[in-house]
Structures are given as structure tokens and as C-alpha cells.
């Protein structure tokens, strides 16, 4: 960071100031002083120039109000930003709360305890509570509306300071004797704080300030120190939390009066006075530190006594109360940022996230890409790439690590030190990581070239030769290949003498050896590496072979280094902001090869002060731009041009144009970068050349450009000459700026005879296409206007010109226009497909039309297109694939068949599980592999125990007999499991119906094969013969309904029994005896025994029991139970049937085998009866009339 004094405001009557406070949100500045002085000021920028923003814009006092109310010296002022209130207190103990009303401040509340003086006041983070501490130990906590919440007397303690924790749960009280005590937010004592920074301190000390950063702007690092406590003797400790045992300790070596964190907790300002070593007089200084105790800058401030310090809300200015003045200093922060390939890369912190948010803002297309990086250390850019340096997530503690460093940084770090691993991430301009390297050295300073990344710690520097998929020149490729032997990663200690004699490889262990003269900055070009050291020494190394070429000595420590485009001159900005130049090509003396330091002479008397940024031109070694306070200077051969007012950071200097970015403005709303914050400045020679061309003429301008040659100026002259059709001058200028395309264009213009034609070509060259088209049309050259629009890809205008012109237009060109417009809509997808279809239809582009129909899911349109296409058209197979992907089998088959691809049609049917269609197609086209495929798929299903799916597969493929076999298998398995009989019956019925389908299939195939006239008997006989030939299992074919019959009558008998038709139930049960091979005999004869008993036919019952007792499948226990039950029944009843039952049974036996009625289970004795057309089973006509479906096979009754 860089800081400089920018403004001074005097307080009238030389009244000395005691305190100052800056409202972070609204920008008001309150200052209190002797004699009751209290003023509220506000600085606001007032400018109409859009380029003058931020610190560069002039600022004036928009408010300067004196607040009357205090009589004694005002000692404490504090803001409540959330509620726009100001709280002040004077030496008499009077407290006043002020409020803003209609642009002015008025008293809202007054309080005076009349016992003691207020030493400190603090509002909590959300502005709801204020804690007031008095010198006599009294503490009062009040609410924002003036109510007292609680009070407490800390007897025996003199209070001096108070601070709230960020979460408002803790209160810190600073005592007059230097102690800090920790209380909760209800006033209960917790503990005394351990003060580590006062170790070895002598004499009485008092607290100069306590400031606990609330985290409102995020943290620079996870677990970042944020509580600062500073003492008047200069000792300071920064803690992570109130009982942190390892705080960061600093000895500022100054008399401190006040401290304050900036808006994001990244910089701590410590204000006070410092005694010069050679003078007795003290002078005022503000020291700036990071949260980790690293010293950043020192600002000297004039005056006798400084009393207060206050940061502006954005962290870009600081206010200092000195004597009877308020001094303002501008701050140029060290943002983490870079510029590569038209992209500004910058990082900022968010309160809600621990990581840094890195934005890659493409300024050309105004697009941004976001990346989150934990513990980001720096951003470095070069060419098209960017390096993000950060701490790696995993830390590796060093065993018994206690590293003692010298006191040159005056930092005493009592924390246990760890060896961290760091990571370098190589990204492109949109934030995509291309490569990364983990390194052990701390990358405090990072620079990069086209081929190398160089990272340096205080003791060593590391080289990484990175690789990216990018075209390199032959020279660069040679440079890369030479370094491959040495390895892509190398580490060198700064004290090692790199003579290039030994290339055996670097010693990594030496990289961590401490040095007396640490590295403070680095820079590099493709052939030179420059390393600056704290003593002022500058080392110059060659690249890519790292050899120490020369050492230089400076008077001051360098802070920033930069080399020009040909590595001949080095720019140095030291820690005081002084810019000097060092000529690298000139050596004042030589020395032997021992590497002793060579004293370099001063190549230039050039020196500029208060410089905080500079950039060499990429294309001119004598041209550079620098930022001095809020002015940008451009130097050519060390001669400055007139300054430009700006506070931007320089991105790029090329083609006599400087690109600058107003990072201060971007950081106010970093999530929405605005192109207004990117400013281009033209240097004087470019402005003068343009003015000469416009006002004087090309000839004089040409002479001026010859005297001040630059490719950009020659291009400017060439363009101006083209505008005036001065082709000779234009060609010479294009030659000077090496623009081959421009030379060719001028030659082409020279071959044109017509003046308007030349004007039209020039207009098109400068992208004035409307003007060029108008000239062509005025010349009646519509064809040239159309060609121009075709080159531009403006097919809408091409179509318009084709339609509006007189005469016939070219049909081929018209079709091309329609198709191009269709492509335009199709590329935008979504609802634009509809528009694309209209144009493709007119352009007869069937391929793209099919694609549009498919994307629109307009399958009717796709079907119409299939019908329109001729046979064997190459598009038909693609359309078939489109139909297949959405499951439209029939349409896909039609498309495949039309292009003579039956194999693809069959494959589609198989894929969509349309096996019947597949088999039919296979038979039609004599394809033998379908049965094999079907068997494989069925086997696959059976292996996975998906038998029903296999049945369905065979059924759809019209392999009914195979399906029936599987169905019978399922039914038999279910029967063995003793599943519900109705379910088993349904399975047998389904199997039998599949057999019937097989019969029908055989019959149909015989009819189709028949030639001439044959009788039905011949068909039937042929069908039977084919069945015998094709079916291996005749039992299934002949007795398909037997299983269904068995379970039908089994269920019917039980239904009749429960409904009270005892006789019918018994006769049905008697019929079941024929099905012992399907239903277990024990179930048949048990049912028969029950039915006979209920029908009092004990003879039949006896025969059933005899059969049951003789069954071999019964175990002895079950057989014994049957015998006992039989004994119990037949001791009561004689085992004889009634005469009527005997007559009926004898009549049935005499008449032979009669068909059984499937409704009643009785034999059918009538000559006329009903027969089912499907299962061929019979029923009494009177009985079946009550049913709509066949009781056995459930087919509808005709």
C-alpha cells in the first residue's frame, strides 16, 4: 500500500482537537476539542467529469456544522452508523446523543451523572446497545432508545477503555493501570486477559486503544487476528479472540495515542509520535500493520501533537486530529488484482464466506466468472494467463520448531510456527485451472513470463516452467527444450553464487536457510530475472538458465520493480514512493568471476516522488506511464507529458493507449463491475496526430508521424488516407505498420475503376456497412450488396434484398438464404425451432427439417417427411433412428423398410419389445437369426427368474407353444405351493388359451400355404400333422385344458357345498377323481368325504375314507386321525348310500362317458347343449343362459 497527505482542514480559533471519528456508512466526520468544540464535517466529491471518480475527484465540505451543547473539552465521540446517531462526552461527564434531522444535527438525549468523567463509549455491532465507562469504575449499558439496561460499579478500578465483541456477548474493560478485564454482556466477570506483548517492558503503562474488528467486511484469512490492544509505550498485541494464548505481538517503538482497524480488518493504523535517533524532537507518525504484525508503511505527519485517527468507510482515506487541524491522507491499497487478455482479475472478501471471491471480469464482452480461493495470497498475470498463490489447506507442523528471527521487522511472534505448504494455480482468463504446483517456500513475491513462474520467499526463489496448450514461436520452443534437462522446477537460495558452472541440480534443503539480507521484490521478462533485497542490492539473473550476471546497489529498499519490453531498463519504486530508473545494459566497471558486488553508476538523474504505480509500454522500451498521487504521467525518453487526473490502476500500455481500471470504484460493488470504471487514455502523440489529420491535413500529419514513428500512428494515417482515397499514402503507411491485409486491400482498391465502388469498399472496411450497401444499390449493383451481406452473415438482409430487387432472383441463393436463416433460429433452440421449420421448408433442407421436427417433437411432421422422401434416401435411416428413440416402432419400421434396411427394422422391434412384429418381419424377409435372438433373450429372462416376462416375450413373438410350456410350469409350481386355487385355475386357463392360440396359428399357416381348392377336412388334417411335427410335448397340446378343468371342478364342488347343494357338490367331487394327477388325492377324497357325509351318502363316504387310509403319502399320525374319524362316523351310521344315489351312479355307469356340465358339474344327458367356442367345454343350455362368460375359460358367451 501507499499513503500520502492530501488535504488539511483548520479548526477556527486554533482550538486544539482531542478526538476524531468517521462515520463509516454516511461519511460524516465528528471532531471534539477544547472549550466544548464539537463539529460535524462531510467531504463530498463534486465533478461532472465521468473519468474523475474516487480520490482523483475534487472533494469539498458539503457539511461543516458546529454542535452547541458542551461546555468542557469534548473527549469522546462515537458513531452509531445503523441508527445515524452521534454520541459525545466532555470533561464534565455530560453525555449528549445527537440525531440527524433534515440535513442538520440536533440534540436528542442528554445525560450527566455528575460524579465522574466518561473515559470511553462503544456501540455494539448492530447499534442496539451502548456501553459507557467512567473513570471511577462505573459502567452503564443502555439501549439505542435511551433506556438503561444495566449498571455496575467496578470498585477499586479506574476505567479507561471499553470494547464489544463482534457477537455482542463479551465486553472488554481497559483499566488505567494497563489491565484488560473480560466480562459477559450482563456485567459478570469472566477473567483477566493475558497481556503477552508487555514482556520485558519496564515502567508504568497505560492503554492507548482497544479495537475489536466486527467482521463486517469479511476476513483476509480464516481465523484471522482481529482484536487489537495497544499501549502507550508502543507495544501492541493482536488476538484472534479474547483468550488467545498465542497473539501476534508488535513493538512499534513509538508513543501511541490511538489505533483503529480499516473497513475490512486488513490494516491496523497506529497513530502517535516517534523520537528520531539523531534528534531530540519528536515527530508525529502513523504506522500501518497487517493483522499478522507485518509492517506496511509509515506516514509522517506535521504538527506538535496527534490526538486521534479515523478511517473512512471505504478504507481509501484516513483522518488525523493534529493540534487544531484535521489532516487527510489518501491510501492506495495493495489490491489483489491483475490484467490479462482483456480480463481484469480481482479478489475481495465477503462477510459470509471464509474464502476470497476472485472475479474474472471479461471487459470486452462484459462477462464475469467467479472462483473462490481459500487463503489467497496474491494474483499475478502475464499474457493470457494468471497465477493465484494461496496457502494449501493442510498444514504440516514442524517437529519442535522454534525459529528465531532477527529484530529487523520488529515483530515478536510468540505463536508456534509451522511449515506451511503453498500452492500456485495457473488459470486462464476465465478462471479455469490449467495446472498447479505445491511448493514449500512462502510465495511472498510472484512474477511470471510467457514460460516461467517465479515465486520468492525472503530467503529463496523458485522457478516453475509451466506448460499450456498454446502456440509458441520457434525461439520460445528452443528456450523451453533447453530447460527440460534441468527439470521444470528449480529452487535457488538468494545467497548462492549462481555462476552456471554446476548444473547438477539445486539443493532444496538450502532454500530454508535464513539470510541477513532478505528478498523484498522481484520482476522478470523472458530473458532476465531481477531480485531486490532489503539492503538495496539488486541481483540480475539470466533466464531460462539462472546465472547471476550482475549486482547493483541502491540507496533505498525497493518496493516495486518493473523492466521495459527489451529488458534494457529497470524501474524501481522504493518504500518511500520514489521512482528511479536503472540502465541494465550499461556497466560502469567489470569484476572478476568471484561474484563480488559491482558498484553501478547512476545512468540517469531521473527521480519522481509519491509514485505508487507504473507500467512500461509493451511495444516501446522508452515509453512508460506512472501514477503520482492522483495524476497519471506519461514519459517518452524521460520527458513527461501533461498529467491526467485519475486514481486508476494501470492495466495495460500498448499502441499509445493506456488502459486503466478504477479498482476503488469496483470494490464498492465488486459483484457488479461496470464498464464505466475502465478508462482508456490516449497519449499526446496519438492525440496530436489525430488533431493534425483532422485540422491540417494528411501531408503535414505524415511528416509529424515520420518524426515520431509508431505503428499505431502509421495505422491512424493509413485509415485517414483511405477515407480520402489517397491510396499511395495509405499503402506507404500500411507498409510502415506492417499490415499485410491493409496493403492487399489498397492494391484491390487500385484495381477498381469506379470511384463510388472504392468508396463503398472503404466504407465496408471501416464497418460502415449500411453506407456501403447504399452506395452499391445507388450504383444498381444489388449483387455486390448481397455479397457484402453474405460475408457479414446477415442473411435476413440477404433475403430482403433478393425479394425486393427487380427481376428474377437466383433460386440457389434464395434456398441458401432460407437455410441460413433456418440455421440462425435452430442454433438458438427452444421456441426458435418453429421459425426454423418454416425456413427449412422453403429452403428444401430435409436434413435440418428432420432435426427440427424431432426437437419440436412434431412426429406427424416427421412422418409426412418420411412419406415425401424417395426410396433409399440416406435420411430415412436417421429418421428411423429418431422414431426408435421415442418408442414409435411402426413409424421407425416404415422408415427402415423404405430405405431397404429390414435388419435395422427387426432390431428396432426387438429393442422396443415388439417381438410379434419382429418375427413377422423376419419371416417376410427370410431372416433366420430372429429365433436364436428370441431364445437368447428368453434364456436371459429365465436366468433372472423373470418367467412371466419370458412368457410375454414368447406370446408377443407368436411363439405360443413355448409360452404355454412356461405357463404350465408356473401353474404347476404354484399348485405345489398350495397357493389359492382360484389363482392356480387362472394360470392353467392362461396356459390353455396359449395352446389354443398355437392351434389357431397352425391352422392359419396351413390355409396360407394352400394352393387351389381344398376342403376344410384337408386343412384340419394338415394342421394336425404340422402340430405333431412341430410340438415335442403332445401331452400339453392334447390335454391343454385338463389342469383348468381340475381346479374349476375343485372350486365348484366347494362352492356348491357352502351354498347347500349337497348332492351336486358330491357328484362334482366324484368327478374330481379323474384328476388325481393334478390335484393331490388327499384333497380330492377329503372333499368327497365331506360332501358325501353332508349328502348322507355314507357308502360313498366310506369308500373315500378307505382311499384316504390307503394313501402312501400320509404319515402314520395323519392315517391314524383318519381311522379315528372313520370309526366315529361309521359307528353311528351304516356305510351305505341311499337307493336314489345308488340308482343315479348305476345309471351313469350304464350310459358310458357323458360330457360334464361346467356350470353344475353334472353329466349332460340332453341331446342339445351349449359348447364354448374357445375351450370346447359343454354346459346345459338352461344353466349357461344365466352367465355372460364361460365359467371355465371366461370367454364371452355367444
Image (cartoon, rainbow, N blue to C red):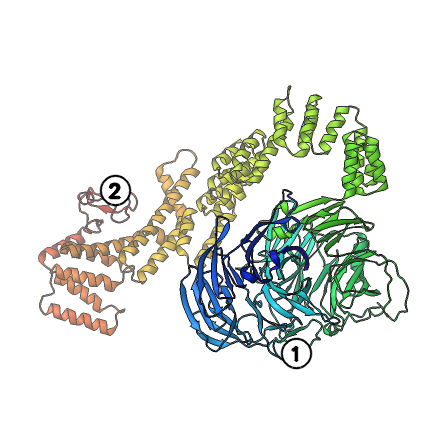
Task: Say which label, 2 or 1, has the lower sequence index.
Answer: 1
Which element carries disc 1, helix, strand or loop? loop
Q: Name the residue furthest top.
A: 807
* Residue 1197, numbered label: 2
Residue 67 in the figure: left or right of residue 1037? right
Label count reads 2
Res. 739 in view: no
Give me the residue at 12% from left, 56% from top.
Answer: 1141
Residue 873 in the figure: left or right of residue 756? left
Judge whether 1054 appears above or below 913 on screen. Answer: below
Residue 601 quadrant: bottom right
Depth check, front residue: 560 or 745:
560
* Residue 505, numbered label: none
Give me the residue at 21% from left, 56% from top.
Answer: 1071
Q: Dot 1 surroundings within 10 Å: few (below 14), some, or many (20 or more)? A: few
Depth check, front residue: 64 or 188:
64
Amino acid at each position: 500500500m501507499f499513503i500520502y497527505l492530501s488535504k488539511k482542514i483548520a479548526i477556527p480559533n486554533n482550538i486544539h482537537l482531542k478526538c476524531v471519528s468517521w462515520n463509516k456508512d454516511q461519511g460524516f466526520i465528528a471532531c471534539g476539542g477544547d472549550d466544548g468544540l464539537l463539529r460535524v464535517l462531510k467531504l463530498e466529491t463534486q465533478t461532472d467529469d465521468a473519468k474523475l471518480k474516487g480520490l482523483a475527484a475534487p472533494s469539498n465540505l458539503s457539511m461543516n456544522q458546529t454542535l452547541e451543547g458542551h461546555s468542557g473539552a469534548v473527549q469522546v465521540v462515537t458513531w452509531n452508523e445503523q441508527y445515524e446517531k452521534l454520541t459525545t462526552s466532555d470533561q464534565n461527564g455530560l453525555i449528549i446523543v445527537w440525531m440527524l434531522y433534515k440535513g442538520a444535527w440536533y440534540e436528542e438525549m442528554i445525560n450527566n451523572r455528575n460524579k465522574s468523567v466518561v473515559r470511553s463509549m462503544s456501540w455494539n455491532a448492530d447499534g442496539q446497545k451502548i456501553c459507557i465507562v467512567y473513570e471511577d469504575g462505573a459502567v452503564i449499558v443502555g439501549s439505542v432508545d435511551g433506556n438503561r439496561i444495566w449498571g455496575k460499579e467496578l470498585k477499586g478500578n479506574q476505567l479507561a477503555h471499553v470494547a464489544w465483541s463482534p457477537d455482542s456477548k463479551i465486553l472488554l474493560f481497559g483499566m488505567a493501570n494497563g489491565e484488560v478485564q473480560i466480562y459477559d454482556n450482563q456485567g459478570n466477570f469472566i477473567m483477566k486477559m493475558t497481556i503477552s506483548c508487555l514482556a520485558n517492558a519496564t515502567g508504568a503503562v497505560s492503554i492507548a486503544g482497544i479495537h475489536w474488528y466486527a467482521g463486517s467486511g469479511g476476513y483476509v484469512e480464516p481465523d484471522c487476528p482481529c482484536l487489537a490492544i495497544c499501549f502507550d509505550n508502543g507495544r501492541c498485541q493482536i488476538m484472534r479472540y479474547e483468550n488467545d494464548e498465542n497473539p501476534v505481538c508488535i513493538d512499534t517503538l513509538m508513543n501511541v495515542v490511538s489505533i483503529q482497524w480499516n473497513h475490512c480488518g486488513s490494516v491496523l493504523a497506529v497513530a502517535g509520535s516517534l523520537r528520531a535517533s539523531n534528534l531530540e524532537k519528536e515527530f508525529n507518525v502513523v504506522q500501518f500493520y497487517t493483522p499478522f504484525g507485518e509492517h506496511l508503511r509509515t506516514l509522517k505527519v506535521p504538527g506538535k501533537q496527534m490526538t486521534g485517527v479515523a478511517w473512512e468507510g471505504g478504507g481509501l482515506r484516513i483522518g488525523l486530529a493534529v493540534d487544531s487541524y484535521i489532516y487527510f491522507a489518501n491510501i492506495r491499497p495493495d489490491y489483489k488484482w491483475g490484467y490479462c487478455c482483456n480480463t481484469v482479475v480481482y479478489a475481495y472478501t465477503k462477510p459470509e464466506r471464509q474464502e476470497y471471491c476472485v472475479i474474472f471480469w471479461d471487459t470486452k464482452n462484459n462477462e464475469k466468472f467467479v472462483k473462490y480461493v481459500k487463503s489467497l495470497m496474491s494474483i499475478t498475470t502475464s499474457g493470457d494467463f494468471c497465477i493465484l498463490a494461496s496457502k494449501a489447506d493442510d498444514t504440516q507442523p514442524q517437529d519442535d520448531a522454534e525459529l528465531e528471527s532477527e529484530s529487523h521487522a520488529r515483530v515478536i511472534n510468540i505463536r508456534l510456527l509451522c511449515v506451511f505448504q503453498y500452492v500456485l494455480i495457473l488459470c486462464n482468463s476465465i478462471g479455469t485451472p490449467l495446472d498447479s504446483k505445491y511448493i514449500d517456500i512462502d510465495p511472498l513475491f510472484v512474477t511470471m513470463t510467457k514460460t516461467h513462474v517465479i515465486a520468492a520467499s525472503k530467503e529463496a526463489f523458485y522457478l516453475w516452467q509451466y506448460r499450456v496448450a498454446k502456440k509458441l514461436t520457434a525461439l520460445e520452443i528452443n528456450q523451453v527444450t533447453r530447460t527440460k534437462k534441468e527439470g521444470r522446477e528449480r529452487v535457488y537460495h538468494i545467497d548462492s553464487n549462481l555462476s552456471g558452472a554446476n548444473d547438477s541440480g539445486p539443493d532444496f534443503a538450502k532454500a530454508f536457510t535464513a539470510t541477513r539480507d532478505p528478498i523484498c521484490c522481484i520482476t522478470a521478462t523472458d530473458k532476465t530475472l531481477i531480485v531486490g533485497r532489503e539492503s538495496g542490492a539488486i541481483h540480475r539473473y539470466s533466464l531460462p538458465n539462472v546465472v547471476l550476471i550482475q549486482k547493483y546497489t541502491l540507496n533505498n529498499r525497493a518496493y516495486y520493480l518493473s523492466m521495459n519490453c527489451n529488458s534494457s531498463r529497470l524501474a524501481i519504486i522504493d518504500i518511500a514512493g520514489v521512482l528511479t530508473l536503472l540502465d541494465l545494459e550499461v556497466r560502469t566497471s567489470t569484476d572478476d568471476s568471484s561474484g563480488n558486488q559491482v558498484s553501478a553508476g547512476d545512468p540517469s538523474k531521473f527521480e519522481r516522488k509519491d509514485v505508487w504505480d507504473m507500467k512500461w509500454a509493451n511495444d516501446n522500451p522508452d515509453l512508460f506511464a506512472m501514477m503520482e498521487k492522483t495524476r497519471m504521467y506519461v514519459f517518452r525518453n524521460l520527458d513527461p507529458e501533461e498529467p491526467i487526473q485519475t486514481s486508476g490502476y494501470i492495466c495495460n500500455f500498448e499502441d499509445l493507449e493506456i488502459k486503466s481500471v478504477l479498482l476503488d470504484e469496483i470494490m464498492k460493488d465488486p459483484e457488479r463491475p461496470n464498464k464505466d470504471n475502465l478508462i482508456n487514455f490516449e497519449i499526446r502523440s496519438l492525440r496530436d496526430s489525430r488533431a493534425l489529420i483532422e485540422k491540417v491535413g494528411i501531408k503535414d500529419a505524415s511528416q509529424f508521424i515520420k518524426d515520431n514513428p509508431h505503428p499505431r500512428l502509421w495505422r491512424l494515417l493509413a485509415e485517414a488516407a483511405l477515407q480520402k482515397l489517397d491510396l499511395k499514402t495509405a499503402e506507404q503507411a500500411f507498409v510502415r505498420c506492417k499490415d499485410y491485409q491493409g496493403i492487399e486491400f489498397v492494391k484491390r482498391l487500385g484495381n477498381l475503376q469506379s470511384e463510388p465502388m472504392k468508396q463503398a469498399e472503404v466504407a465496408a472496411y471501416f464497418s460502415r456497412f449500411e453506407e456501403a450497401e447504399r452506395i452499391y444499390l445507388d450504383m444498381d449493383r444489388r449483387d455486390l450488396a448481397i455479397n457484402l451481406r453474405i460475408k457479414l452473415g446477415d442473411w435476413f438482409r440477404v433475403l430482403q434484398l433478393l425479394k425486393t430487387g427487380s427481376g428474377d432472383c437466383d433460386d440457389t441463393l434464395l434456398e441458401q438464404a432460407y437455410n441460413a436463416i433456418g440455421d440462425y433460429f435452430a442454433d438458438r433452440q427452444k421456441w426458435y425451432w418453429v421459425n426454423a421449420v418454416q425456413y427449412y421448408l422453403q429452403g428444401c433442407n430435409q436434413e435440418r427439417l428432420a432435426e427440427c421436427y424431432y426437437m419440436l417433437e412434431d412426429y406427424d411432421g416427421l412422418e409426412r417427411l418420411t412419406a415425401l422422401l424417395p426410396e433409399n434416401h440416406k435420411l430415412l435411416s436417421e429418421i428411423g433412428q429418431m422414431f426408435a428413440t421415442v418408442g414409435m416402432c411402426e413409424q421407425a419400421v416404415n422408415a427402415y423398410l423404405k430405405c431397404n434396411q429390414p435388419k435395422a427394422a427387426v432390431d428396432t422391434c426387438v429393442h422396443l419389445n415388439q417381438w410379434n412384429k419382429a418375427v413377422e418381419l423376419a419371416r417376410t424377409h427370410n431372416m433366420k437369426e430372429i429365433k436364436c435372438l428370441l431364445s437368447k433373450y428368453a434364456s436371459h429372462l429365465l436366468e433372472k427368474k423373470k418367467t412371466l416376462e419370458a412368457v410375454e416375450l414368447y406370446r408377443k413373438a407368436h411363439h405360443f407353444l413355448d409360452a404355454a410350456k412356461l405357463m404350465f410350469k408356473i401353474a404347476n409350481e404354484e399348485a405345489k405351493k398350495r397357493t389359492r386355487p382360484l389363482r392356480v385355475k387362472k394360470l392353467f386357463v392362461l396356459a390353455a388359451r396359449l395352446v389354443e392360440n398355437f392351434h389357431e396359428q397352425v391352422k392359419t399357416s396351413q390355409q396360407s400355404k394352400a394352393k387351389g381348392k381344398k376342403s376344410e377336412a384337408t386343412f384340419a388334417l394338415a394342421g394336425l400333422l404340422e402340430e405333431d411335427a412341430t410340438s415335442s410335448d403332445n401331452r400339453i397340446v392334447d390335454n391343454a385344458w385338463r389342469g383348468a378343468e381340475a381346479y374349476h371342478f375343485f372350486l365348484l364342488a366347494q362352492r356348491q357345498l357352502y351354498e347347500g347343494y349337497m348332492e351336486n357338490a358330491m357328484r362334482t367331487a366324484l368327478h374330481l377323481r379323474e384328476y388325481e394327477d393334478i390335484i393331490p388325492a388327499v384333497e380330492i377324497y377329503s372333499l368327497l368325504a365331506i360332501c358325501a357325509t353332508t349328502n348322507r351318502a355314507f357308502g360313498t363316504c366310506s369308500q373315500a375314507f378307505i382311499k384316504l387310509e390307503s394313501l402312501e403319502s400320509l404319515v402314520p399320525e395323519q392315517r391314524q386321525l383318519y381311522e379315528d374319524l372313520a370309526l366315529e362316523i361309521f359307528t353311528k351310521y351304516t356305510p351305505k348310500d341311499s337307493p336314489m344315489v345308488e340308482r343315479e351312479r348305476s345309471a351313469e355307469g350304464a350310459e358310458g362317458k357323458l360330457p360334464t356340465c361346467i356350470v353344475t358339474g353334472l353329466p349332460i344327458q340332453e341331446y342339445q347343449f351349449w359348447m364354448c367356442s374357445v375351450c370346447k367345454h359343454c354346459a346345459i343350455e338352461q344353466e349357461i343362459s344365466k352367465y355372460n362368460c364361460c365359467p371355465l375359460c371366461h370367454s364371452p358367451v355367444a
